């Protein structure tokens, strides 16, 4: 069994540009645990490098990745306005049409939370969840085919898993835990999916809570 500790389980979606997709993973978790002073120096240094890359003549896919990295850096610096502005420049290579809006709303939700505005935060969580559910419905046939796979590790490293982790992550923020557990169990039974995978998914989301989500 693969150890999933401290990994954000992000598969590359079908048809996504791999260069840009590589920019969708978050910066290394070390940023969260280092001393504040070192953290700020690290982020400022990373931002200098990003600005230098922006001025270079690079392929559009890499430019999009650069803007993703820039957004991540500003996010960790808690400069949410600049993080959103960076994301607005990402114009291609994303998994699906609404994904940029989802990322922007994640950052806005984080900013609302930092300001103590839980009503706006929860409203944005609902918008994010609705976008994920709509996307799930659009590609349901393909995702369910993956989720029926017998190899649990392959399912966990798939794009289908990424969607479920993100979708149920936001469901847990808005709905009671027992309702979400029932939804996961119902999905497993409805598609005759890999039970070990779904049991592991519940454990990951509800018991261990040992996973990472971009811009959270």
Image (tube, helix red, strand yellow):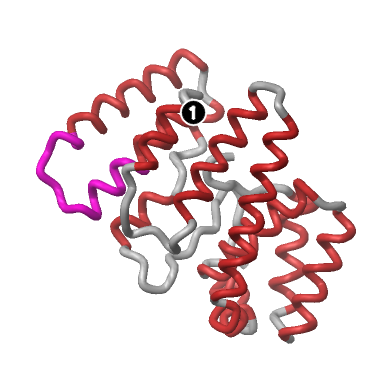
Which residue reaches farthest left? 57
Q: Quadrant of residue 139?
A: bottom right
Q: Where does the C terminus fall, quadrant-wise? A: top right
Which residue reaches farthest top? 37
- Give the percent coordinates (x, y) of residue 75: 47, 31
Q: Quadrant of residue 142?
A: bottom right
Q: Is residue 212 magenta?
A: no
Which residue reaches farthest right? 178
Q: Which residues are magenta?
A: 53-68
User: Circle 1 is placed at which residue position?
Assistant: 80
| Residue name at image x 71 percent, y 27 percent | 117
- Give the percent coordinates (x, y) of residue 143: 57, 77
| Residue name at image x 71 percent, y 23 percent | 116
- Give the percent coordinates (x, y) of residue 182: 86, 67
- Give the percent coordinates (x, y) of residue 173: 75, 46
10 horizontally vs 56: left or right = right
Q: Quadrant of residue 168?
A: bottom right
193 horizontally vs 163: left or right = right
140 horizontally vs 24: left or right = right
Main secondary-structure element of the magenta-colored stretch: helix
SS for tag 1?
helix
Of 162 and 118, the residue lying toward us: 118
Q: Where does the N terminus fall, quadrant-wise? A: bottom right
**Residue 101 against residue 113 in the figure, above or below:** below
**Residue 160 against residue 98 in the figure, above or below:** below
| Residue name at image x 87 percent, y 52 percent | 176
């Amino acid at each position: 069994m693969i150890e999933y500790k401290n990994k954000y389980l992000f598969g590359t979606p079908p048809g996504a540009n791999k260069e840009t997709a590589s920019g969708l993973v978050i910066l290394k978790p070390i940023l969260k645990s280092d001393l504040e002073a070192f953290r700020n120096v690290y982020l400022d240094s990373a931002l200098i490098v990003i600005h230098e890359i922006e001025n270079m003549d690079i392929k559009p896919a890499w430019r999009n990745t650069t803007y993703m990295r820039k957004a991540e850096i500003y996010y960790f610096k808690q400069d949410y306005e600049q993080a959103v502005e960076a994301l607005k420049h990402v114009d291609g290579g994303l998994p699906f049409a609404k994904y940029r809006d989802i990322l922007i709303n994640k950052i806005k939700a984080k900013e609302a939370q930092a300001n103590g505005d839980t009503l706006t935060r929860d409203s944005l969580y609902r918008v994010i969840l609705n976008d994920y559910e709509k996307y799930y419905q659009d590609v349901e046939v393909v995702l369910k085919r993956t989720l029926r796979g017998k190899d649990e590790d392959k399912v966990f490293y798939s794009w289908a898993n990424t969607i479920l982790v993100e979708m149920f992550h936001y469901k847990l923020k808005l709905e009671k835990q027992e309702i979400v557990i029932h939804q996961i169990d119902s999905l497993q039974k409805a598609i005759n999916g890999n039970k070990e995978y779904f049991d592991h998914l519940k454990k990951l989301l509800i018991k261990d809570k040992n996973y990472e989500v971009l811009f959270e």
